[in-house]
Image: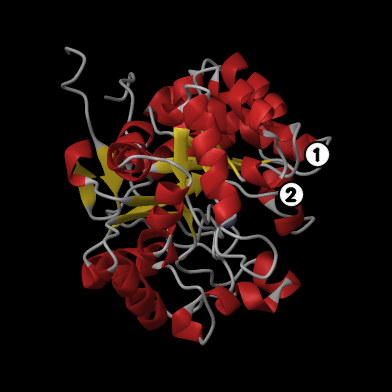
Amino acid sequence: MRHGEFELIVTVLGEIAPAELGPADCHEHLLIRGGLPIVLEPDFALDSVDAAVAEVGEFVAAGGRALVDCMPLGVGRDARGLVEVAERSGAHVIATTGFHKDRYYAADHWVHTYSVEAIVELLVAEFTEGLEVSGYGGPLVSRLTARAGAIKVATSGPIPTATELRLVEAAGHAQVRTGLPVLTHTDDAGSADVQLSVLTACGVAPSSIVFGHMDRHASVAALAAICSTGASVCLDWMGRHDRRPDSYIADLVAALASAGYLEHVVLGQDLARRAYWHAYGGGPGLANLMESFPALLHKAGLSDDQIDQVLVGNPRRVLNRTETPLA
Ligand SMILES: [Zn+2]
């Protein structure tokens, strides 16, 4: 197979060519139903498909076209709901397999005891066979035809737990088998280094990794250092207008552009609270990224072409599958 022929992004409604993707939010949460996260924080409950359709509708009306739902296995992912949101809103929705942080899994959850090899098979099957409707909440396995389009991993604090390290390793092996991009949750400035070393030890190319949330805790120099490995960063602490203006992220994008790393930058919003959604009576709403943020990028000094690269061109590349044995 010639390079270039292998170009597919896996959405819940099927594979698309990267050129079809359009402006993308690379870290979002459309539905969170069940699991420990909403027990720990009731405001995480994004439990209405109708609300998600309305909110994604605003995002599409503002010029958005694609969103990655970053809720992986066992923490409230609603695979069936994601398919319905994609069908009714017209947006490309990419579902993630993989894992969130240790604290979101009960002490007796299988993530703590299954072997790395067994977990790799569970992840790969979400790509080859389809998303498991309960996130392997078991004991019965029931799959949709919709497949996983990305693999999520997460580590917490400066020292990841033993479970997290095993799950990142499993995700690394699954990436090599499937070619899916790895999207990460980081908790602090050192998280990316730990995740990078575990993933690359499994054979994952840095170009298949997008480190999330690093704008929350890393300097421009630290972000540039990550990009220099060939990996990408998702700047996604957007819309917290009560805590930090979005112009902070726009300035980070401009600084990374000046350092020569613009092609390693994608954007997300991570608006995983009812308080952030218009459909639940809050704000700024999912449309924020497409409605307000481009003007801030302009103000920070980016050209139209550069803005297009961050919102469209880079997501096309980082969400694309690489060639694998399963191709
Ligand atoms: Zn998130």
Q: Quadrant of residue 81?
A: bottom left
Q: Is residue 89 left or right of residue 236?
A: left
Q: Quadrant of ligand 1?
A: bottom right
In space, the residues marked 1 and 2 are separated at their CA atoms by 7 Å
Q: Quadrant of the N terminus?
A: top left
Of the image marks 1 and 2, the number of the one nearer the N terminus: 2
The vertical placement of 6 against 64, above or below, is above
Residue visible at 75% across and 70% down in the picture: 40
Residue visible at 59% across and 31% down in the picture: 170
Can see residue 17?
no
Name the amino acid, label 1: Thr
Residue visible at 40% across and 48% down in the picture: 298
Farthest top residue in view: 2
Farthest bottom residue in view: 281
Q: Is residue 229 left or right of residue 197?
A: left
The residue identified by callout 2 is: 102
In the rendered structure, find residue 30 and report the number of the disc placed on it.
none
Q: Is residue 93 left or right of residue 109?
A: left
